Image (cartoon, helix red, strand yellow):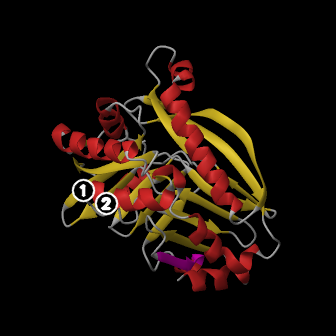
Amino acid sequence: MFDRLNSLISKGSPCFFYTDFQGEKLFCCPFEELEKHDIEFSFENQIPSTNVPHKPIYTPVTTASYHQKFKAVQEEIRNGNTYLLNLTQPSFIQSKYTLKEIYLMAHAPYKLRVKDEFVCFSPEAFITIEDNTIHTYPMKGTIDASIPNAVQNILENQKELAEHTMIVDLLRNDLGMVADGIKVEKFRFITTIETGEKKLYQVSSHISGKLNYDWKQKIGEILKALLPAGSISGTPKKMTVNLIHRIEDYDRGAFTGIFGYFDGKNLYTAVAIRFIEKKNSDLIYKSGGGITADSNWEDEYREMIDKIYIP
């Protein structure tokens, strides 16, 4: 499928694609085949026609289960095997809406629905390629906007600063594998997310680099080199991904993969977070956050739950 993606993009054919977490599986198709595959996506941040505030009823993993996995992560940090690991877990949710209805009502910059299998409404871009320049926008750090002085608190929090800096450094190195002239365009800026129940502030940065003019002929290789996305895996990446598989003990699937499209000239992608999957008759919401040596397990558990929403 990566070969097919290379073929479509090198010919200038507009197309859509998505991958699993590690980029081992990829689906792609020309735009005209999207309806046949029952796939919808949007990168336009449109106000939805069906805008119903909806907080799903959720049943997360127990605090005891989460705490055990958190301690396993911190043990690996103490052993020097990872410095930052994005720990996620599945929560069962209840909703009276179908995945298609959830897709239509959700308001997010990047949305995707694949059949009756999963839907996501992501706030996070992955890479954008315009005029042979590659951009990435790592997002790391979340705080409830109702907390007094929330922006100042998160920007001055040393744990959050360290976590974000590690991700920016990782993404700089990742882009350096496929591009030249890597630079941090903007470091730690605030974006606002409306969850329907509360407002969240998230911290992002902007990194760019220059690609060779022939990037369309090898976009598959570029994506393989960059996946999995650093903001939802950790550092060092290879070892941390191995630890994620062992400690999380569930299948992320397309959650924390990427999805995007080529418009005939430029490429746009997003990270598949804020994600609901349907398994049999159950709805599962997958969420989490980055763990460092300074993390507090109760705060991280709360952040995992705060991310269970339909915006």
At horizontal 41% and vertical 31% (from top left) the residue drawn is 294
Question: How many residues crowd mark 1 within 10 Å: few (<14), some (14–19), many (20+)?
Answer: many
Amino acid at pointer 1: Leu
**Residue with the mark numbered 2:** 277
| Residue 175 image-quadrant placement | bottom right
User: Which mark sits nearer the N-terminus, 1 or 2?
Assistant: 2
In reply to whether residue 98 is colored magenta, the answer given is no
**Residue with the mark numbered 1:** 283
Please give left or right for residue 145 compared with residue 280 in the image.
right
At horizontal 81% and vertical 62% (from top left) the residue drawn is 131
Amino acid at pointer 2: Glu
Question: How many residues crowd mark 2 within 10 Å: few (<14), some (14–19), many (20+)?
Answer: many
Name the chief secondary structure element in magenta: strand
**Whole-percent x and y of residue 182?**
76, 53
Furthest residue in direction top, as rendered: 148
- Label 2: element kind: strand
